[in-house]
Structures are given as structure tokens and as C-alpha cells.
């Protein structure tokens, strides 16, 4: 069982970007651990999480880079755009400034990812409706104008978190199926594991024991 | 430089005579400006030259002192002949100062030492006339090409034809190696590495290898910036990276405050691969940000103690920094992002803690450092993409059951780790599985007790079941035994 076989057939790389404090690390934690971590420490440089999901009967391992929003880490986090199949761009619905900065995040993302990278816009902290500073409609319009997928979510309640990560994966998978994403291209952000997805094969098959093929691995927030 | 023009005239001088059993050789020093070189000729060489000069160029027959068969070993005769031959050669040189005959030029070895002649002979050299995959030139030849290129811009010079040929040849080249030297060139006082050169005619180079060159003598690298994909400058005595990347700039060193100025300078736009191994670089400076597309940098064999400013390179995949003076690299993930290959072999690292969050790393070479404790390897245990780890040559590699202990750190991923270029054997994996099983059993038994040191706190419980099932039964007893001994 030296180099596999793996219990998933694809690896998709994601990057989460957005201003500091919008809830990027909490979204990742909610997605990988199904828990809200209210006192998430500041991200230094970059953090990482994985989870195996299923799209159209295929097991897909998501490798998610959670970047630091602080300006002083901007340079180092920029390098993680390379080879990202999906980019989750997050703002905080209760802080207008984080929404205003989206265009600068989008510029980075467009400049540094490949043209097929799926960019998904998330308005986080949807649970704090009373403190809302950005309307759903204007963000929706921004997303449309820029060709982004969009939801409002809450890392606290978990609402729409799953959806954001899964919809991104579906879109990437669709791009692979219709040939618009070339798997052989360097930096596509997608790796294919030909032997993957076969239950019971090899030493790592036990990971399949967990429900619905959704397995959590180490998330370090 | 040796360049014949109105200011730098050609002069010759006979310095001495060497005599052997059956020959007498005249040592001639040729001067052009402040460049000089030595040429040796016998009387018969003069005869030969003279004959060609008289037939081809109408030089008077009587100028050459006559041949003498008997008594030509007599010292007073030799001394007189030396003076006569010197007068002859000086006379011919003076006559031809404006238009030196090729026969005379060859006699005085101008094509070896004088730049217009050297450039002209290069113009018909097959390196410039035919297509070659890989071209080799010396710094002296580069200097000659640059000289021709500069002279061609003066309407008076006749170098236009050579220049066109050189330009065509140079534009065909894709891969070029230039060899420099700090030693005197042949019999001259020319030191190649003191000669300036430029790349103006080399417009389409993809690969440039500078061997023992003095990069500070590059007067124009702008065409390189537009075309080079790979640049190698190993062993060029570089002390700073900016001395290469800004070799043709007046102001080379930039600090954080001048970042804006630096950003306005022309980039090494297509450059992907930079090899600066075996120089004397003590730190990485901001000039690397001029190579934004860089994917691979080789800094092995320098004097680095840290890895700075590499965050300026968002496409960087591979860093080779072996054989430097690195002791520690705290929080390297804040200085390097999305790195795939890292070679830190032959440094002085005691700890790997700074690498703990380089999540994108696939291969890591930390061989021949000072890593002593297996706990240091645990810092690598959460790197999710890691596949190749080289730890040989560290004190830790000599401990009992080193391989199993290292593999155990990687928990459920241990079968994916290639340690010291070897994949784990089934036996090793079985042993690791038992170790892990024992540990987790212990963990659940003693969970109420104060903390025991657990080697692998992230150990997933599921592994226990599967690995036990996978293990061939006859081996179980031995494996458990060995594993227990390990404890
Ligand atoms: N109410 C609420 N608070 C959130 C939510 N997501 C994150 N937070 C809080 O916002 C703060 C910053 O979150 P963090 O994930 O560290 O932000 P990051 O800098 O983008 O990674 C923390 O105090 C979180 O508790 C959310 O959906 N709702
Ligand atoms: Mg964070």
C-alpha cells in the first residue's frame, strides 16, 4: 500500500481570502469540525484544513488554505492563490469596510489564480442581522457584475457554510467534466488520483467508516 | 581594452632573444594602448611575412635584413640582427598603421588579442554562422562582440558588416554559456574579468550560464531581462543578489524605503529559474522582487543565515539553500508561502519547529544538520502534503529504531512518507501500527492521569482497527515484542 490507493479520487485546493476578522478561520473550522470556535486565534501567515466530500458519487478531498487577512501577511498569502481551484472570498455583513475591500481582494485573486478558478463570495456573520451594514441585494449585484457565486452564511450557526464549500466543488467538478478545466495544466489546483474512491482498498480505507464519506482531518485554526 | 584606433596605435618592441641548439627566437611585445602581448618569431617567419608583403602589398624587397648562414649563432651578430629586425617590423607597422595587412595582423596575433580583429573572426565563426543548441563564449569574446556593437554605431568605422553578421548569429542563440577568468589571457596582460560586456545583440536568450564571470562588468542586461527564463551564476564571487540582477544599474542596493523606486525598475519578467549557488551571498536582498515569476531559486553554498524577502515571489515552488549557515528559521511560513520543495541540507539547524506550518511542502531535505531529538520530527507531522523527507546525516538518524520512530510521527499518513529516499517497508508499517495501537490503548487507559508524553497527539483512533487487521498474523507476536522493546 505504498503510495495509496487513496480513498478519494480528486484533490481540490481552496484558498479563503478577505479582511482580518471577517470569520475566515471560523468558516473553515465550522466546515471541517462542524463547530463554532468563538475565540479563534489570529491566523499567522496561513493555516490549513482538509475534509473529504462527495460530488456526483466521487470522493473529493478539499485542501483548504486559510490565509491571514492582515496587510503584513499579504505578500506571503498571495503565493497561495497559485494552484487554487477555488477561492472563497469573505466579507463581514456587519462591517462595511470589509465589503469595500472586496475589489482589491478580487484583483489579487484574478491576477494570481488561473482563469478557471471558481471564486465564491461569502457574506459572513449572517446571524447578526441587527448589526447589518451591507445589504444582501447590493452584494448580490456585486457578485453578478463580477461573475461570482454568492451566499450569505454564518460560521456561528453553520448556515450556508456547507453549501458554499460544496457549491464551489460542484462548479469545479463541472468544469472538469465539460473540459474547461485542464487537469494536466500546472496549477489547475486539481489533482486526480486514479485509484481513489474504492472503499476497502488499502490501509487508509478505515476513513470511509465515518458517515456519508465526510471525514474530518486535522484543522488547525 | 585592446582596440586599435587613432588614440591607441600599434607599436612593437623586441625585448629579448631566446636561443636553443638549432634556433634563435625573437621575443616581441606588441602594444595597443595599454594592452600588450608577447609574440615569438624566428628569422624564417620574418622571411615568410616579408615575401607575402612584397608580393601582395608592394613592400620594398630590400627592407628585410639579409639571411646569413655561417656564424649566425654569434652573440654580436644576433644582437645586431635583433635591432635590424626590430627596425624592419617597426617600419612595416608604421607604413601600414592605417590599413594593416591581414598577413601582418596574423603575424602579430591581432585576432587573438585585438577586439576588432577578434570580433571579425567571430563573425565568421560557426558559433555565429550556424544554429547551435548551446553556445559557449568567453568573456573576451563577449567583450569583442560588445566592442563591435559599440563601434558600429560610429559611422566612420568599417565594422558594419561584421556587426550585422554577429547580430544575426547572436539573435539565433537561445542558450549561452559565458566563461570568465581572473587570470591573464594567454601571453597578454588582459584580465578577462576586467573587461566590460553587454548583451545588446543577444535578444532571444532563454538560458544564460555565467561561469566564473565578473557580473559587475555587464554594462547592459536589458535584453536579458526581456527574454531569459533561466539564469545561472554559480561561483561568480557574488556578495549580493542585486549585483547580478541590477548589474547594469548605477544604484544597486535598495532598502524597504526605496521599494517604490525598485518597483519602477525593469523586471526580469520571464525569469523562472535562478541559480546563485557557490557565491558569497550573506543575505537575500529586495532585488529578488524583480523576478516576480521566479519558481526555483538555488542559493546553496552561500553564507545565508536566514531566508528573507522571498514572500515577494508568489510563484516560488522550490528553494535550495543547502550548505549555508542556517541555524534556525522561525515561523518560516510567514516568509515563504506555498512552497513545494525545500532543501536545507548541510546547515546547522537544531530544530524544525519553524517549518511546522509550511503546509504546502511536498519534499523536505534537512539532511546533515544538527537535529538530535525525534521530537523535532514531530513538528513536521501536520504537514498534509509532505511525501519526501530526508534526515540522514543528523544525530537523530543514529538512534535505535530511527525509521519506525520517524514514521510513527506521521500517524495515519506514515505509509505515504518516503523517508531518506526509501518507502517504508511492510514490516516497518506493521511495527508502526503496533506502536500506534499500544500508544492509543495506553492513552485511553491512563487518560485520567497527569499528562504522559505522547509522541503523536494527533493520532487518529481509526488506524488501530484497520492496521491490526492488515497485519499478517504470524508476524504479530514479533512485531508486538519489538514494539514493546521500543517503549
Ligand atoms: N456572530 C458571529 N461571529 C463570527 C462569525 N464568524 C466569525 N465570528 C467572530 O469573528 C471574529 C473573527 O473571526 P476569525 O475567524 O478569526 O476571522 P479571520 O481573521 O477572518 O480568520 C471572531 O471573534 C469570531 O468569533 C459568525 O458567523 N457570526
Ligand atoms: Mg483567521
Image (cartoon, helix red, strand yellow):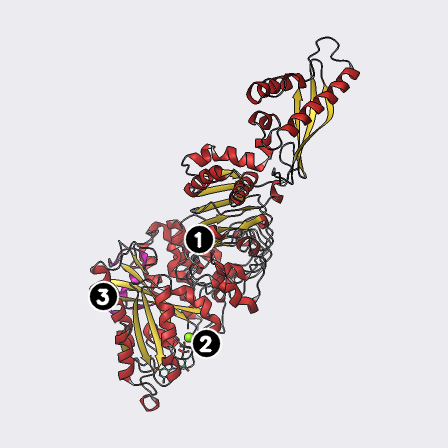
Q: Secondary structure at mark 3?
A: strand
Label 3: chain letter: A
How packed mark 1 is, by other alpha carbons closer than 10 Å (few <14, some 14-19, many 20 or more), is: some
A220 drawn magenta = yes
Coordinates of residue B360 in the picture (x, y in percent): 41, 61
Q: Quadrant of ligand 1?
A: bottom left
A94 drawn magenta = no
Give me the disc on residue A42. Answer: 2
Q: Is residue B480 left or right of residue B397?
A: left
Coordinates of residue B381 in the picture (x, y in percent): 44, 62
Give me the disc on residue B226. Answer: 1
Q: Decide if ligand 2 comes within 8 Å of the CB at mark 2.
A: yes
Coordinates of residue A68 in the picture (x, y in percent): 43, 72
Residue A213 can be seen in this image: no
User: B201 or B11: nearer the eye?
Assistant: B11
How packed mark 3 is, by other alpha carbons closer than 10 Å (few <14, some 14-19, many 20 or more), is: some
Label 1: chain letter: B
Q: Is residue B85 left or right of residue B193?
A: right
Mark 2 or 1: in front is 1
Circle 3 residue: A55
Amino acid at each position: 500500500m505504498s503510495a495509496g490507493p487513496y480513498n478519494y479520487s480528486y484533490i481540490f485546493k481552496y484558498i479563503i481570502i478577505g479582511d482580518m476578522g471577517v470569520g475566515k478561520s471560523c468558516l473553515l473550522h465550522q466546515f471541517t469540525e462542524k463547530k463554532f470556535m468563538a475565540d479563534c486565534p489570529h491566523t499567522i501567515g496561513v493555516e490549513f484544513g482538509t475534509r473529504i466530500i462527495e460530488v456526483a458519487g466521487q470522493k473529493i478531498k478539499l485542501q483548504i488554505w486559510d490565509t491571514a487577512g492582515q496587510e503584513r501577511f499579504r505578500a506571503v498569502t498571495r503565493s497561495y492563490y497559485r494552484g487554487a481551484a477555488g477561492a472563497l472570498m469573505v466579507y463581514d455583513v456587519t462591517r462595511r469596510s470589509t465589503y469595500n475591500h472586496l475589489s482589491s481582494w478580487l484583483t489579487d485573486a484574478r491576477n494570481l489564480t488561473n482563469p478557471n478558478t471558481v471564486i465564491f463570495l461569502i457574506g459572513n456573520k449572517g446571524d447578526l442581522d441587527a448589526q447589518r451594514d451591507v445589504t444582501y441585494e447590493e452584494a448580490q449585484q456585486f457578485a453578478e457584475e463580477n461573475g461570482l457565486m454568492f451566499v450569505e452564511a454564518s460560521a456561528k450557526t453553520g448556515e450556508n457554510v456547507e453549501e458554499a464549500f460544496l457549491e464551489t466543488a460542484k462548479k469545479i467538478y463541472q468544469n472538469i467534466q465539460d473540459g474547461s478545466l485542464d487537469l494536466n495544466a500546472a496549477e489547475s489546483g486539481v489533482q486526480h488520483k486514479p485509484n481513489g474512491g474504492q472503499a476497502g482498498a488499502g490501509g487508509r480505507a478505515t476513513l470511509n467508516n465515518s458517515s456519508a464519506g465526510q471525514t474530518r482531518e486535522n484543522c488547525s485554526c | 581594452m585592446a582596440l586599435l584606433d587613432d588614440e591607441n596605435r600599434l607599436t612593437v618592441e623586441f625585448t629579448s632573444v631566446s636561443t636553443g641548439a638549432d634556433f634563435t627566437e625573437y621575443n616581441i611585445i606588441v602594444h595597443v594602448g595599454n594592452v600588450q602581448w608577447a609574440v615569438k618569431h624566428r628569422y624564417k617567419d620574418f622571411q615568410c611575412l616579408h615575401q607575402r608583403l612584397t608580393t601582395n602589398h608592394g613592400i620594398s624587397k630590400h627592407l628585410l635584413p639579409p639571411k646569413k648562414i655561417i656564424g649566425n649563432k654569434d652573440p654580436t651578430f644576433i644582437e645586431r640582427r635583433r635591432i635590424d629586425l626590430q627596425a624592419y617590423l617597426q617600419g612595416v607597422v608604421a607604413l601600414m598603421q592605417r590599413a594593416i595587412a591581414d598577413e601582418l595582423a596574423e603575424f602579430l596575433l591581432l585576432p587573438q588579442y585585438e577586439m576588432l580583429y577578434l570580433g571579425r573572426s567571430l563573425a565568421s565563426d560557426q558559433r555565429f554562422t550556424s544554429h547551435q543548441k548551446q553556445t559557449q563564449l568567453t568573456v573576451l569574446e563577449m567583450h569583442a562582440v560588445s566592442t563591435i556593437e559599440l563601434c558600429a554605431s560610429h559611422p566612420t568605422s568599417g565594422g558594419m558588416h561584421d556587426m550585422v553578421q554577429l547580430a544575426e548569429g547572436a539573435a539565433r542563440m537561445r542558450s549561452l554559456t559565458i566563461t570568465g577568468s581572473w587570470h591573464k589571457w594567454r601571453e597578454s596582460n588582459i584580465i578577462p574579468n576586467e573587461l566590460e560586456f553587454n548583451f545588446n545583440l543577444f535578444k532571444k536568450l532563454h538560458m544564460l550560464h555565467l561561469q566564473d564571470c565578473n557580473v559587475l562588468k555587464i554594462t547592459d542586461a536589458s535584453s536579458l531581462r526581456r527574454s531569459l527564463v533561466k539564469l545561472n551564476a554559480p561561483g561568480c564571487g557574488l556578495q549580493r543578489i542585486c549585483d547580478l540582477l541590477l548589474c547594469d544599474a548605477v544604484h544597486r542596493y535598495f532598502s524597504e524605503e526605496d521599494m517604490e523606486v525598485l518597483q519602477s525598475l525593469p523586471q526580469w519578467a520571464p525569469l523562472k529559474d535562478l541559480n546563485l549557488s557557490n557565491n558569497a551571498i550573506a543575505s537575500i536582498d529586495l532585488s529578488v522582487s524583480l523576478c516576480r515569476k521566479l519558481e526555483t531559486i538555488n542559493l546553496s553554498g552561500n553564507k545565508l543565515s536566514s531566508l528573507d524577502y522571498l514572500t515577494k515571489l508568489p510563484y516560488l515552488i522550490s528553494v535550495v539553500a543547502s550548505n549555508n549557515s542556517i541555524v534556525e528559521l522561525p515561523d518560516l511560513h510567514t516568509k515563504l508561502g506555498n512552497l513545494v520543495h525545500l532543501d536545507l541540507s548541510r546547515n546547522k539547524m537544531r530544530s524544525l519547529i519553524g517549518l511546522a506550518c509550511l503546509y504546502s511542502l511536498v519534499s523536505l531535505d534537512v539532511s546533515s544538520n544538527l537535529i538530535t531529538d525525534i521530537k523535532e520530527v514531530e513538528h513536521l507531522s501536520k504537514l498534509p502534503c509532505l511525501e519526501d523527507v530526508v534526515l540522514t546525516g543528523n544525530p537523530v538518524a543514529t538512534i535505535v529504531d530511527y525509521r519506525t520512530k520517524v514514521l510513527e510521527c506521521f500517524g495515519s499518513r506514515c505509509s505515504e512518507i518516503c523517508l531518506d529516499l526509501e518507502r517504508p517497508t511492510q514490516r516497518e508499517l506493521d511495527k508502526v501500527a503496533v506502536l500506534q495501537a499500544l500508544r492509543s490503548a495506553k492513552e485511553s487507559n491512563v487518560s485520567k492521569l497527569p499528562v504522559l508524553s505522547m509522541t503523536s497527539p494527533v493520532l487518529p483512533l481509526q488506524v488501530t482497527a484497520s492496521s491490526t487487521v492488515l497485519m499478517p498474523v504470524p508476524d504479530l507476536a514479533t512485531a508486538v515484542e519489538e514494539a514493546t522493546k521500543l517503549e
